[in-house]
Image (spheres, helix red, strand yellow):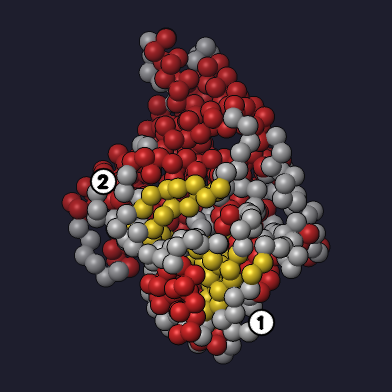
Amino acid sequence: MPENSWPESNSYNEFDPLESLWVDIVDADLEPLPRYGEGQVNRRRRAAIALGMIWGGTIALHFFSVGIWMIWAFTTLMGVHALRLLLTQPRTAAATTWEGEDYPFVSLLVAAKNEEAVITRLVQTLCQIDYPSHRYELWIIDDNSSDRTPLLLERLAKDHKQLQVLRRLPGAGGGKSGALNQVLPLTKGEIIGVFDADAEVNADLLQRVLPLFQQEQVGAVQLRKNIINGNTNFWTRGQQVEMVVDAYFQQQRVAIGGIGELRGNGQFVRRRALERCGGWNEQTITDDLDLSLRLHLDQWDIECVLEPAVQEEGVLRAMALWHQRNRWSEGGFQSYLDYWQLLVRNRLGTSKTLDLLMFWTIKYFLPTAAIPDFLMSLARNRPPLFLPLTSLTVALSFIGMIRGLQQVRKANNEPVLPLTTLMQAVQGTLYMLHWFPVVASVTARMSVRPKRLKWVKTVHQGATESIDVPLEG
């Protein structure tokens, strides 16, 4: 393809993510992963069954005296897992340089729609990375933008030789996943990096990330996301701490043989691993979480690092945060519903399965069980049954925030201020409580609402404001 050309297509003839699933994985001695679409059927029924089991089991435990002892036993097991997380040293620190003369070719991908406020800054940032210019390329997929994004990209392509632009026509579906799948056959990279349009990175990004792929089992690497407008208000400060504790716990989970997850912005995937997993799933609202599970089910590891970080905008308003977190929560729950059979058959392996169970309990079970537990505690005039487990979860999150904030400060050669760190952790803990109503409402809604795919993008305002609007329903 000529450099800086503008192909226009809404066809997927060049790359079929469904067909690519039927690749030879004999070397992994595994059955092929299910085709996209097979796991997505009956999500509503599966969600209703899961909700019924959680609510029914919670209510039943209140009527048995042994129930509280079962909760304390599980809390003890969770406590052991928590101690392992907090005491383990991250295993990614040793990989600092690329061994060998030939650097891998890297393709950086950005799906953009109406991003005139940030697209120039993005291109200039990614085209000035400290890496041999002939060993990486930048692809912007303009998803039928109606603002000045196409014009700006056309001008930028004349000044930056690494920049390639793919223009999608109206009707090209699949949201962000569809855009990434469409451009993938045109790329040359051994490593595929995916960013959002508001991303900002340090110049040494690739030099610090690529050495991690020298571990043969590493299929992907996720960077910590840092909120560039984090000092704006309570919500952005909360997101700032949330991203730190998320990256910290993922790093620790990986270190004990657990699960690392992709977060969309600032993710790098080995091309061979991506193609074996069938590309990006166009039948889910969170392609990153779906791909995370598929990579692990295909026996790949995902490394997560605190540094370097990728900068992105945080949403400013409570309602925008509510909608964004609802989307994230529903997408994560969809992944469990889609692949539950493979998960219960322990295809991940014992270590990853136990880790996944523990964090599924924290992220989905406890918020969902909170409603019947609270109602039963009122009816029977006793404390909530899951209070020990909830207390452990809050304490683990609080300690993780402190540890994560300390590590980030040390990595950036900043002084560790105990009082400031403590106050950030307290504020972050209060902020994180929003996940309880979010997840509780999402799991209930998914069990009664007909399946509906709706891709939503966050409108970026150049680090000044971010709001969520629907792309298509």
Q: Nearer the viewer, residue 2 or 414?
A: 2
Residue displayed at 40% across by 26% down: 387
Q: Where's residue 450, x and y in %?
A: 63, 32
Q: Which residue is mark 1?
A: 1
Residue displayed at 76% across by 65% down: 13
Q: Nearer the viewer, mark 1 or mark 2?
A: 1
Q: Which residue is mark 2?
A: 234
Quadrant containing the C terminus is: top right
Within 10 Å of disc 2 (Cα), the crowding (few <14, some 14-19, many 20+) is some
Q: Where's residue 308, x and y in %?
A: 40, 69
Left or right of 283 in this view: 329: left
Left or right of 404 in this view: 126: right
Within 10 Å of disc 1 (Cα), the crowding (few <14, some 14-19, many 20+) is few
Question: Image quarter for residue 461?
Answer: bottom left
Left or right of 432 in this view: 60: right
Q: Is residue 441 above or below residue 123?
A: above
Residue displayed at 72% across by 62% down: 12
Q: Where's residue 242, x and y in %?
A: 37, 50
- Which mark is drawn over residue 213? none
Q: Nearer the viewer, residue 295 or 122?
A: 122
Q: Nearer the viewer, residue 199 or 268?
A: 199
Left or right of 415 in this view: 175: right
Real-space CA distance between mark 1 and mark 2, rounded to the nearest whole angstrom = 48 Å
Give SS at disc 1. Answer: loop
Quadrant containing the N terminus is: bottom right
Q: Dots 1 and 2: beta carbons under 8 Å?
A: no
